[in-house]
Image (cartoon, grey):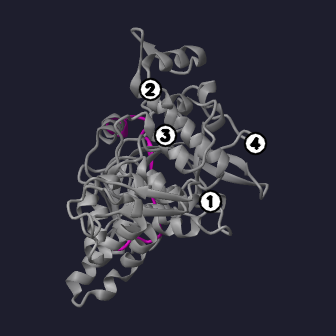
């Protein structure tokens, strides 16, 4: 960890840090804030100085940078200005804007984590879930000129030992060096003599998530499965985002800050305009589920599952929520999944048998509570394929789920093949008491592929 770092940005050098609002806005919109590698400067340095135009440098040439403490602003000073920003506002509009800027600034620079990171009594290892969620929020709007650098930069940020993994080869700049690493390790497939860049990055991201699990076991946030954007296609990693630089925001109720717990299992009557259904025996508590947005991966999964709804062996659906009892407004994010297997396993360390649900994600959905559309005495129980809405089964909060991406031929009659040895140490992913985690090899497992 560096003791001191000076940030020299050509645009910031032209600015005069007179007011708190000006300093915060200029830093928040600077090119320095948009680069992935610079996130390490803010998080890993003990003290960070941001250089602005000094009183003896009106042209912003940077000739007085040797006196950086006089013309610059420390990140601690900016943090203080951010915290005090809303106290200086007088009306509701400026106060709400101040709160928005404050939240964006702290998220983009891992503000809360930096404050704890610089304290010796709060090592990074004890805050795995919080640090991972904070790192994702900070990196989602950033970019890098080399996509291969993403996992390398994030591994350094999270203090992961990436030696002997595919991530180590990302630092090689020359194609000849990369090709040599591919040939020696035989882990990246080649097409027409050239390495497939997409497959390279997928294997790097696979190694990255595996390293996170090994270093912070049980701390991968369950809310990751609700994030927008494409997911990985490798078996067992269908819950993981393809990239952290998604330029997408979380949906309400911001699942990275929460533990996933409630779940609903449905039948097979899924209408074109969404679905409404009750979940209690008195037919008095109703919910509505509608699709959210559009995405290539989600649309492909939906098109594949639709014909099977009307087949002889129709699939069984489930909805995974961030928290129990969604309200009427605003609707909350959820996952529509297909349950393709149920199994009993021994849960460690309690050493008790627990039921696991194996499911694959179809798409993200909005879930909201609605007023009872019919009186209980007028409700007709679903029968066959009449189109009547099903009755949802509310699952216990400690239900265990194995979540993966959608595979067309993986259903109750055909569970597919076992994953290759490449992902044998992280082939399962589960929502387990608020965590998404690959099952480790030293724990008892049941073959399901």
Lateral position of residue 403 relative to residue 290, left or right: right
Q: Which one is closest to the eye, mark 4 or mark 2? A: 2
Residue located beneath label 3 in the image:
151
Q: Nearer the viewer, mark 4 or mark 1?
A: 1
292 and 176: which is toward the camera: 176
Q: Which residue has dot 1 on it?
A: 124
User: Which residue is label 2 attached to?
Assistant: 173
Q: Residue at x 41, y 42 (%)?
A: 243
Q: Of marks 3 and 4, which one's residue comes earlier in the chain?
A: 3
What residue span does the magenta drawing correspond to?
306-327
Asked if one can make out residue 406 in the rendered structure from this viewpoint, the answer is: no
Q: Secondary structure at mark 4?
A: loop
Please state the horizontal and vertical placement of residue 77, each as a whole percent of the image: 42, 74
| CA–CA distance in space, label 3 to label 4 | 30 Å
Judged from the image, the secondary structure of the residue bearing numbered disc 2 is loop
- Which of discs 3 and 4 lies nearer the camera? The answer is 3
For the residues labelled 1 and 3, the Cα–Cα distance comes to 18 Å
Within-10-Å neighbours for mark 4: few <14, some 14–19, many 20+: few
User: What residue is at 59 percent from the left and 54 percent from the top?
Assistant: 1
Circle 3/circle 4 CB separation < 8 Å: no
Judge left or right: residue 50 versus residue 439: left
Mark on residue 105? none
Q: From where the camera sits, is residue 314 visible?
A: yes
Report the residue marked by disc 4: 444
Tell whether 6 sits left or right of 102. Answer: right
Query: Splitting the image into 4 quarters, where does residue 426 fall?
Result: top right
Looking at the image, residue 330 lies above or below residue 227 = below
Check the image and name the residue furthest to the bottom.
90
Q: Quick one: label 3, few (<14), some, or many (20+) residues within 10 Å?
A: many
**Residue mark closest to the camera, 1 vs 2:** 2
Vertical comparison of 126 with 83: above or below: above
Q: Secondary structure at mark 1?
A: helix
């Amino acid at each position: 960890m560096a003791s001191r770092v000076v940030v020299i940005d050509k645009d910031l050098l032209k600015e005069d840090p007179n007011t708190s609002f000006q300093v915060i806005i200029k830093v928040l919109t600077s090119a320095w804030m948009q680069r992935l590698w610079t996130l390490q400067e803010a998080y890993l340095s003990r003290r960070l100085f941001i250089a602005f135009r000094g009183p003896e440098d009106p042209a912003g040439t940077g000739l007085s940078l040797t006196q950086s403490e006089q013309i610059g602003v420390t990140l601690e000073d900016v943090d203080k200005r951010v915290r005090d920003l809303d106290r200086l506002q007088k009306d509701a509009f400026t106060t709400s804007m101040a709160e928005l800027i404050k939240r964006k600034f702290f998220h983009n620079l891992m503000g809360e984590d930096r404050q704890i990171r610089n304290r010796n009594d709060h090592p990074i290892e004890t805050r795995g879930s919080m640090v991972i969620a904070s790192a994702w929020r900070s990196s989602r709007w950033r970019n890098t000129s080399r996509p291969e650098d993403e996992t390398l930069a994030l591994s350094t940020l999270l203090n992961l030992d990436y030696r002997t993994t595919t991530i180590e080869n990302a630092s090689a700049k020359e194609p000849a060096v990369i090709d040599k690493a591919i040939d020696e390790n035989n882990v990246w497939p080649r097409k027409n003599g050239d390495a497939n860049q997409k497959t390279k990055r997928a294997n790097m991201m696979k190694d990255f998530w595996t390293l996170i699990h090994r270093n912070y076991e049980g701390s991968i946030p369950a809310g990751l499965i609700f994030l927008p954007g494409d997911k990985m296609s490798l078996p067992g990693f269908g819950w993981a985002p393809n990239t952290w630089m998604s330029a997408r925001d979380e949906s309400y109720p911001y699942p990275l800050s929460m533990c996933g717990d409630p779940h609903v299992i449905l039948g097979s009557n899924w209408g074109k305009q969404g679905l409404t259904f009750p979940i209690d025996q008195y037919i008095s508590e109703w919910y509505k589920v509608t699709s959210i947005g559009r995405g290539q991966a989600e649309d492909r999964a939906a098109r594949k599952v639709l014909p099977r709804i009307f087949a002889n062996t129709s699939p069984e659906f489930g909805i995974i929520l961030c928290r129990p009892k969604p309200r009427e407004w605003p609707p909350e994010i959820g996952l529509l999944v297909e349950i393709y297997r149920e199994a009993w396993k021994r849960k460690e360390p309690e050493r008790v048998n627990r039921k696991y649900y194996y499911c694959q994600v179809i798409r993200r959905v909005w879930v909201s509570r609605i007023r009872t559309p019919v009186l209980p005495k007028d409700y007709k129980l679903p029968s066959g394929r009449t189109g009547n809405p099903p009755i949802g089964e509310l699952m216990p909060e400690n239900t265990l789920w194995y979540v993966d991406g959608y595979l067309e031929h993986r259903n109750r009659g055909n569970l597919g093949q076992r994953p290759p040895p490449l992902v044998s140490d992280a082939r399962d992913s589960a929502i387990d008491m608020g965590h998404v985690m690959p099952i480790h090899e030293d724990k008892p497992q049941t073959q399901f592929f």
